[in-house]
Structure formats: C-alpha cells, structure tokens
Image (cartoon, helix red, strand yellow):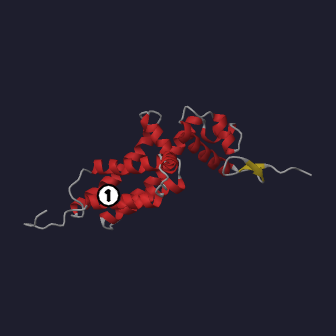
Amino acid sequence: MTSQAKVPTRTGRMRPGRRPGATGTREALLAAGTELFADRGYDGVPVWEIAKKAGVNKAMISYHFGGKRKLYLTIVGATFSEILERVEGLAASTAPAPDVLRELIAVVGDLASRRHPHFCTMMLREVLTGGMRLEPEVVALPMRILAAVKGIVERGVREGAFRPVDPLLTHLSLVGSLVFFFATARFRERVLTDRLHVKPPSAEAYVTHIQDLVTNGLAASKTGPGRRR
C-alpha cells in the first residue's frame, strides 16, 4: 500500500493529498512570501522558511522565481498590477467623479483586506527603508496609480464636483490613511482589545468612513454668489 503525498494547507502545514502542481506551488510561495516579508521584512526571512511555510522544497523558489529577491519583486509587481488594472478602469469611467473615487476606495479596501491582507504591511516596511529594493519597472506601477487618481480628482474639479485641491496631496492622503490602517491591524487589535477593551473597527466600516471623509472633504461649496459661507 502506497502512502499519500502531502500538500500544504492554508497555514503552511502539510496534509495528505495530491502534490501541488506548478501553479499551486507558485501561488503557495507567493502567499507564504508575502506573509513572512510582512512579518519580518525582506532581510529577516530566509529562503528555507518561505519554502517550509509554502510546504515545498526550497529549490522551488529558484525554479519558479529565480531566487528570493525576484520572488519579492514578483509579489510587489503582481499586486500593484492587479490594483492598477482596477484603478485605471475606474479612471476611464464617465460616472461622476465622487462616485468613481468612492468605488476606488472600496476596491483598494477589498484588495488590502480580503485578497492581499499582508501586502500593506509588507509595503510599509519597504517604503520606510526608502524602497531601495524596488526596480524601476515596479516603481512605475504605483506611479500609474497616482496618475489615475490625479485624473479622477482633476476631472472632479473641472466639473465642479470637487473644490480646487492638489491632486497629489489628495492621493497621498488617501493612500496613506488606507495603507496605515491595514498595515497596523494586529497592533490595533492588541491595543484596542487588550488595553481599552474596545472592539476594533472592521475593514468595511473604515472604508465607508474614508469614502465619506474624502468625498465630503473634497466636495465643492454649495454656497452661491452673495451667500455667506
């Protein structure tokens, strides 16, 4: 009687079943790498630990990605590409700019909380060290996201939906608030729950809060000529 092979579970431990195929191995390494890089940063994670968490041989990192650095860059590039596709699609919409901006915030919130829950922490660690590991082609992706948000804000100003604001500052305010919230989830959980005995806000509640805060804050004044502000 032959014994069953083992494949990784979501937690990285092995369970009986079929061995993962090439796609499964690649996805397992991407997920394991993202979580570990978020926890300890690029330099704090050895190759063997990524492979162990993914439930595969460490040689698979070189086979699929060409090493740890390229695995790291693939995670950043693939995630930004996914965000960019959604954001540029929204920027091309002819819907009212406030509605588009609200949807953009919802998209980023969904990606950061459900699809890629460790990415914000990983990126916050990277930018705090100056982003020196990122190749120019990877850096170009968030720059395109900035351009898309800038276009939405500028259109809102032209159409009179938004008051005159600096699009760059608007983008930085939006990204900064979302990244910080999702990157500090574990700290917030510990402080609010253990110290203050307060239930931490959900991702959905925070996204709605930012949607209201940003769109109301950018809204053009409704006062007419001669009316007191």
What residue is shown at x 71% (from left), y 39% (from top)? 57
Kind of residue at disc 1:
Val
**Residue 107 sits in which quadrant?**
bottom left
Q: Quadrant of the C terminus?
A: bottom left
**Image position of 213 with respect to 135: above or below:** below
Residue at 52% across, 40% down: 73
Residue 94 at x, y = what percent? 32, 67
Q: Is residue 221 something that shows in the picture?
A: yes
* Vertical position of residue 108 compared to residue 133: above or below: below
Of residue 211 and residue 107, the one placed in the foreground of this image is 211
Residues packed near mark 1 inside 10 Å, few (<14), some (14 to 19) or many (20 plus) = some
Tell me the residue that label 1 is attached to.
214
The answer to whether 151 appears left or right of 181 in the picture is left
Residue 112 location in percent, x, y?
48, 53
User: Toward which corner of the image does residue 162 lie, by quadrant?
Assistant: bottom left
Q: Is residue 92 visible?
A: no
Q: Is residue 99 above or below residue 164?
A: below
As drawn, the residue found furthest toward the right would be: 1
- Residue 106 lies, with reference to residue 45, above or below; the image says below
Instruction: Farthest residue to the left: give it.
Output: 226
Closest to the observer, 157 or 188:
188
Count of numbered marks: 1
- Residue 45 position, x and y percent, is 59, 34
Q: Which structural element holds mark 1?
A: helix
Left or right, 18 with respect to 46, comes to: right
